[in-house]
Amino acid sequence: MKAVLAACACIGAFSACSDMFETDSSSVVFEDGNDLQSPNDSLYSVMGILSKVQRLGDRYVLFGELRGDLMKATHDADVSIQQISDFNVGPDNVYRSFNDYYDVINNCNYAIQRMDTSIVFYEDKVMLPEFAQIKAIRAWTYWQLALAKGEVNYIEEPVVSLEAAMKSYPVVGIERLAELLIEDLRPYTGIRELNYGAVNGLETTRMFFPIDMLLGDFYLFLNRYADAAQCYYRMIDKRNITMASNYTNRWNGVLRNSLVFDWLSSYTSSASTEMLTMLAYSDKPKDYHPQLIRLSYNEKPSIVPAVSFVNDMSRSTYFYPSQSNPVVDRYFMGDLRGQAEMASGRIEAAAYGPSRVGDYNGTLIYKFWGMRESNNGVSDPENDKLSGLNYVRRLPVYRASHAYLRLAEAINRYGKPSMAFAVLKYGLKRVDIENPDKVTQGERTGEIFLDFTAGKFDGNVGTATRGRGMGISYDNERQYVIPDYTRYEEKIVTDEGTGDETVIEVPTTDPAEMAEALADSILFVEDRIMEEMAAETCFEGNRFFDLMRVGRHRGNWCDYAAGMVAERFEQNKDAIKAKLKDEKQWFLK
């Protein structure tokens, strides 16, 4: 209720927009009782709400990664950050305040209640797209709040008075919230997507939350795999989203003395065709920006890659392709989406890498540094070892990788492991999914979300090629293949001429044993998908949700996630693992 009261106190609804979304219109401020009755009203309300979502950027990343297995807090970190990383959040932790989330929710509720979606202009309900997007923003905010706390006060009306603030609102857990948000968003699939052109140099199309992506996440969390796959596919198909080969890190030759290093631009560049949704910030250094560069690229960094993650990436096999035949020419070590070690020993940072900042010399998160913008005319008193002031303007939330990897997760659990594995190894396109050596043709059972035969998908490549080499699609024997889990049974064959009997093994037809083999294949592919999510989307705010979601697929998410997360603790792993089997330990209360 403290958060609700704080939201009530903020209800100049949509006031205090940052310069990122500065307008000249007084329509940004609404008094109680005023309705939103023009397209301009709806435009300003959406942009005003997005200015409040900006405040959630740091927590989106920190809550999503510090409770995962890829990032950890250092001894120099603020005690609040250390507590989150160590699952020991105290009553004075600064991140325990969730007022900013309820502020966004309350402003969304205000706009939803006041917006007149019946207004028609040339047979077009002109305010409906903004109405749908505000619901999408509210859904995303509620979801982030639930992932942080484990439950939310579910409020659908604006809190604009003390009387409203004192009401009793239902408390719902994550599973029930997912059901409520599906019910709320489902009517708005297919609504025209918003596009206001460029604002402050950034494309507004990438500032909004795709409803199908949100629905897919909620369905996937609830283990409704076909529904999730349908949503991801619908978005991929409608937007013509592909996994392009130009966003790769790869060796130029077997001597490993030069490389193509383009993968990071899929995350850091505002021109990236893979950016689906980002939190956008002002180009003015004085305005609010996420603190991720200060936290990660500093003489006293607060957050760094987990050593276990760095080691896992270095042990990954790299598949260098033959230049003349479809075979693997060389096998090297290391996923180049982490860092690349030249034959000379020099290391190039991608997601992370060795860096020197002042007296600090160690492995830092380069992914945040790579998306910086700098103002060399001023200095940063909190990071004075770096030249100028460095700040974040674009914080990715969804990229093409998220859509394809979560689609793979859904269709794998739907019972199509070879099709899901193709997302990682080959890319979903006609030439590969119609090849029985690559995709089991019995898995192609007609569902629309399995249809990638259209020409627009011909450019798809496997996600793993982006850091483990284009030759990975040629590896048919060594390691990047689904093992044969087929169960066999003995059968006696009698020679018709001699009458001799021979015992041979044939694939079983027993339904239970066939189901066991399929389950083993699904688990193998799911493990590979989780490895790909770590390599492809590390430090982006997703990992805790990934661990929880996949653990739910397996029946006990705490056990699964606890085992994964305990690996990043260099001491007391068993004690941490035992502690995290209690669901309450994961959430900030």
Image: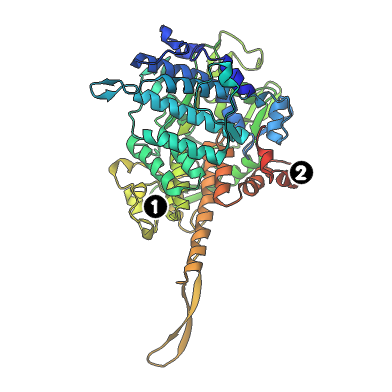
Q: Which mark is residue 326?
A: 1
Q: Residues within 10 Å of mark 1 (few under 14, many from 20)?
A: few
Q: Which residue is mark 2?
A: 572
Q: Nearer the viewer, residue 399 or 389?
A: 399
User: Which residue is drawn at the image coordinates 53% and 40% (left, top)?
Assistant: 176
In which image quadrant can residue 101 be found? top right
Badge 2 or badge 1: first in the primary sequence? 1
The colour scheme used here is rainbow
User: Which residue is drawn at the image coordinates 36% and 49% (left, top)?
Assistant: 450
Q: Is residue 57 visible?
A: yes
Q: Nearer the viewer, residue 227 or 422?
A: 227
User: Which residue is drawn at the image coordinates 39% and 16% (left, top)?
Assistant: 36
Which quarter of the rendered picture does the C terminus lie within?
top right
As drawn, the residue found furthest toward the bottom would be 498
Task: From the top left corner, tell me how far across and down residue 477 is, in percent.
Answer: 48, 59
Task: From the top left corner, tell me how far across and down residue 277 is, in percent.
Answer: 45, 29
Q: How many marks?
A: 2
Compared with 129, 40 (above or below) is above
Task: From the top left corner, tell me how far across and down residue 528 is, in percent.
Answer: 52, 49
